[in-house]
Image: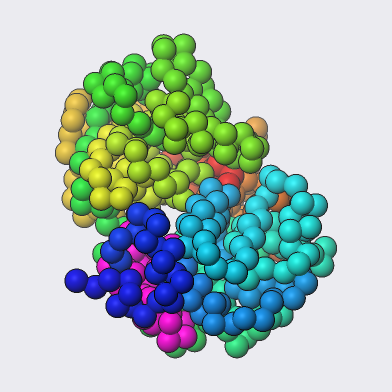
């Protein structure tokens, strides 16, 4: 059996690993680490929870340890970009554990935190900078960080970064990094846009893959329960009472919906907390810390938590609202069955969500087992879809005129940890009818299958 020592890692890293729970390398680590140590550009495809952070983090740290010279004021040796604050925090925590007893200096920068404090931390330079794209651009504009000596670039959860509209930010950041560098791209899914990104930023990359993109962890028991939208809260209560004391995450499609559900659960006696894009960084960290410590029974979240949340104690995931983007289903349920444990996922499907369910089952290439109710009849589905004129701005819902870019997961307006709107058109191919985001009242497909332009989803 392959060990971390067999992979050729530094004895200092092996010693640090002995103090962690990382006893044996996972398949993605076994396949990726040797190529990264050789200096190859790499594209890694693996589902969530398979150890991607160590797959790029350990060999990256190994190579940095070979360089004994300090990085220099404001300079950075290696840059790791991730789409959300939570994922940046997770990467930082893992690398911090790996670097104990070594001189490697890590720095983390995200939106929602003091930019002045981050500037101060960057002043002496960093061996590894882990950042969200928007905040990094803010710091580059201020001259607080310099990437001219950066020899390593890692794009983690690259597909999610594109979903959230970070393409312009990636192009801006790449201009500051030397062309001669090692680039690593990791993703759980492989849409066409990721292939284009790989062709643009990677040179002759090696491709490693341990599971088909989009395939959920086999240890997760999945099922769907058909229920009217108005009955979902009571149904969730029933499921939660079946598993007292077991940690659960319930996913809501909207920020308002997450807050509303949390309030109801608390009124019914559950210890619940919500995280979404309107929460400050401190609030999000406090709620996640309470959940990890077992002080909360239920974490209610928007898709901001679908990736980057590594909480091994989570046993149940409830898709209270089905996601608009089928790939997000895979990432949501991947919050359970972590670290070799088993998990369960239940999806609630209202009449207006049958289209989303079909998309999910198409992605999985199999139907979800029915745990309750029965698939909605076509007349119920049609009656649940609000009639909306296409090609017009949906007032009060953040809608856009047809043909204007509407990227899932990114609301209008500036944001510190997302790409800042500057009037630049999105260079990615646009659908004539972008997929809507929002609650159950969001516009849905017409009978002919076309989708109206809709509001954007939760911000990171």
Percent position (x, y) of residue 170?
Answer: 62, 68
Seen from the viewer's position, the closer of residues 293 and 451 is 293
Seen from the viewer's position, the closer of residues 3 and 258 is 3
Percent position (x, y) of residue 188?
Answer: 38, 61
Query: Residue drawn at (44%, 69%), measured in percent from left and top?
Result: 13
Q: Is residue 396 left or right of residue 254?
A: right
For the N terminus, the quadrant is bottom left
Query: Residue drawn at (59%, 44%), measured in percent from left and top?
Result: 459
Query: Residue drawn at (82%, 67%), measured in percent from left and top?
Result: 143
Query: Residue drawn at (41%, 66%), measured in percent from left and top?
Result: 15
Percent position (x, y) of residue 117?
Answer: 77, 51
Q: Is the image coloured rainbow, by chain, by secondary structure, or in one colour? A: rainbow
The segment highlighted magenta reads 27-55
53 in magenta: yes
| Quadrant of the rendered image containing residue 22 | bottom left
Seen from the viewer's position, the closer of residues 454 and 306 is 306
């Amino acid at each position: 059996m392959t060990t971390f020592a067999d992979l050729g890692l530094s004895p200092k890293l092996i010693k640090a690993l002995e103090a962690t729970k990382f006893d044996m390398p996972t398949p993605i680590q076994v396949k990726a680490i040797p190529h990264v140590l050789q200096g190859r550009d790499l594209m890694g495809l693996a589902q969530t929870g398979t150890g991607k952070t160590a797959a790029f983090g350990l060999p990256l740290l190994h190579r940095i340890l070979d360089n004994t010279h300090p990085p220099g004021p404001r300079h950075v040796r290696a840059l790791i970009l991730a789409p959300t604050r939570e994922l940046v925090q997770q990467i930082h925590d893992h690398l911090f554990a790996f670097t104990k007893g070594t001189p490697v200096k890590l720095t983390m920068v995200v939106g929602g935190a003091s930019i002045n404090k981050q500037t101060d931390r960057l002043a002496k330079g960093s061996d590894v900078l882990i950042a969200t794209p928007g905040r990094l651009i803010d710091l580059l504009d201020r001259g607080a960080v310099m990437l001219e000596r950066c020899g390593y670039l890692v794009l983690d959860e690259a597909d999610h970064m594109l979903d959230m509209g970070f393409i312009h930010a990636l192009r801006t950041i790449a201009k500051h990094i030397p062309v001669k560098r090692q680039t690593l791209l990791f993703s759980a899914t492989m849409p066409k846009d990721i292939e284009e990104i790989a062709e643009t930023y990677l040179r002759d990359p090696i491709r490693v893959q341990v599971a088909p993109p989009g395939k959920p962890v086999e240890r997760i028991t999945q099922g769907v329960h058909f229920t009217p939208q108005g009955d979902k809260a009571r149904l969730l209560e029933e499921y939660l009472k079946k598993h007292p004391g077991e940690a659960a995450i319930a996913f809501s499609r909207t920020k308002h919906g997450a807050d509303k559900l949390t309030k109801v659960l608390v009124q019914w006696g559950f210890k619940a907390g919500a995280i979404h894009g309107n929460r400050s960084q401190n609030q999000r960290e406090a709620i996640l810390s309470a959940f990890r410590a077992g002080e909360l029974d239920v974490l209610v979240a928007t898709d901001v938590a679908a990736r980057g949340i590594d909480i091994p104690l989570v046993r149940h995931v409830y898709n209270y609202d089905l996601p608009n983007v089928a790939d997000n289903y895979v990432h949501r349920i991947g919050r359970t069955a972590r670290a070799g444990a088993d998990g369960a996922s239940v999806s609630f499907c209202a009449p207006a969500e049958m289209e989303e369910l079909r998309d999910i089952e198409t992605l999985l290439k199999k139907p979800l087992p029915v745990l309750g109710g029965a698939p909605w009849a076509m007349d119920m589905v049609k009656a649940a879809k609000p009639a909306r004129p296409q090609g017009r701005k949906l007032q009060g819902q953040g809608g856009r005129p047809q043909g204007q870019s509407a990227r899932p997961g990114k609301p209008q307006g500036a944001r510190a940890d997302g790409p800042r709107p500057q009037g630049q058109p999105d260079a990615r191919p646009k659908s004539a009818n972008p997929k809507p985001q929002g609650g159950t009242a969001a516009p849905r497909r017409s009978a002919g299958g076309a989708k109206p332009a809709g509001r954007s989803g939760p911000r990171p």
